[in-house]
Structure formats: C-alpha cells, structure tokens
Amino acid sequence: MSAIKTWDAAVLEQARKLGTSTLYEASGISTSSVDPTVRTVWPGASVAGPAYPLECSPGDNLSIHIAMERVPRGSVLVISTGGFVAGYWGEVLTVAAEAAGVAGLVIDGGVRDIAALTARRFPVFTRGISMRGTIKASAPSVGQPVSFTGTPVSAGDLVVADDDGVLIIPATRVEYTLTQGQARADKEARMMEALTKGQSTLELMGLTNWREA
C-alpha cells in the first residue's frame, strides 16, 4: 500500500467545524461539491478525513471487501458505483470499518441496515437505501482515482461531509481552503453580531442601492 496524504487532528476538526457550505464557498472549486442527492443516513452525522476512493461494478461490492484490508486508518471511503442503487453496505461492513479505523463512508450507490448504522453512529452518506444484496465477482479499482458523481477524487484528498452534503477538497487546495474558510466564518460571525444589534443584511452586504437597478 502506497502512502497517501494524511491530515493532523487539528486540521480535521477545523474542517468539520467550518462545515461543507462554508468550505465550498471558500474553495473556489465548483466541482468540489458532489451530487446533492448523496445525503446523510442519520441527521447530525459529520466527518472529515482523507479520501480512500474505490469503484464497484453495479450490484457488486467485492471492491469494498478488498479495501478493508488496504485502507489507511482515519480514511473516509469514497465509493463510486455509477449510481446503481443496491445494498452495497450494511451492519457487517460497518463493524469491519470500525475495526479498521475507517472514519466514514460516502457512496453514490446504496446502503441498508439503517437502524444499525444509526445506532452505531457511523457516518454514512449515500444516494439511496436498498434492501437488495450484492454479488462479489469483480473489483474495478481500489485506492485509485475515481470520478464520484462528476467530482474527481484521489487518495488523500480531504473529504468533509455533514447535513449540508459532501465536499471533496483536492489535497493541494486544503490549506488555502481552510484559511479562506476560517476568514469567511469569522466575517459571518461579525455579521450575525451586527444583525442582533439592528443592522440589516442589505446594509451589511452593501445592497442598499438595489432599488436603483
């Protein structure tokens, strides 16, 4: 297994706290936001960690089982299935992932055993829920770059996911995005303080001349 980019705990915590919406605006990369139909399984889930991408054939989850022996601890699995919804993932793989130190799952296919995933508080972001099982016959790629709903993902890119969606920040852009994101968050905090004191969003955002347009 080749080494991939890792991020220290402070970076990951900052990314998680800033959240996907702030970081998306800060990144300046329109493709960093994945398809908004990929949503959290249980409300309040959030995760930040280096991506470990893989690809599954439609209705086949062999790549996931292989990944469990290769994935670096702390990674977020990013699984492309071509949008085919089936139960690629459930409670058994969740227990395996926890034992392997996997931080979370992002998949454009589907998952099942939702009650168990929710009870275990394992962060899962998916396009759909399906009781249909999968075969184990092919493994297109494990740990190699993929296109995830049109967003490029390489091992070590930073995945941030929460109730607002899933964001993939290229490894080379993480430092810039976090710096810009923190500045944006600080500015918004000052704006909200001003709003509580009676100023309007029109004033604060320089939109008072809108009537002249």
Image (cartoon, rainbow, N blue to C red):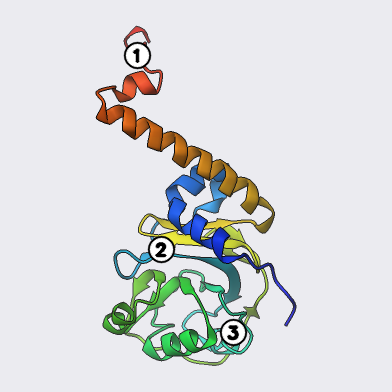
Identify whether 153 is placed above or below 31: below
Which residue is rendered at x = 59% and y = 67% of the image? 50
Res. 208 mark: 1
Front: mark 1 or 2:
1
Mark 2 touches mark 3? (CB < 8 Å) = no
Separation of marks 1 and 3 at Cα, in angstroms: 55 Å
- In this rendered view, identify the residue nearer to me: 212 or 42: 42
Identify whether 156 is placed above or below 136: above
Looking at this view, name the residue that lies furthest to the top. 212
Res. 38 mark: 2
Q: Which residue is mark 3?
A: 67
Front: mark 1 or 3:
1
**Which label's residue is closer to the chain start, 1 or 3?**
3
**Which label's residue is closer to the chain start, 1 or 2?**
2
Mark 3 secondary-structure assignment: helix
Mark 1 secondary-structure assignment: loop
Instruction: Please indicate whether residue 36 sits to the left or right of residue 2 in the image.
Output: left
Query: What amino acid is found at the position of numbered circle 2 in the picture?
Result: Val
Quadrant position of residue 26: top right
Crowd band around label 1 with a 10 angstrom C-alpha radius: few (<14), some (14–19), many (20+): few
Query: Residue 104, how many percent across, how many down?
Result: 47, 74
Query: What amino acid is found at the position of numbered circle 1 in the picture?
Result: Thr
Separation of marks 1 and 2 at Cα, in angstroms: 38 Å
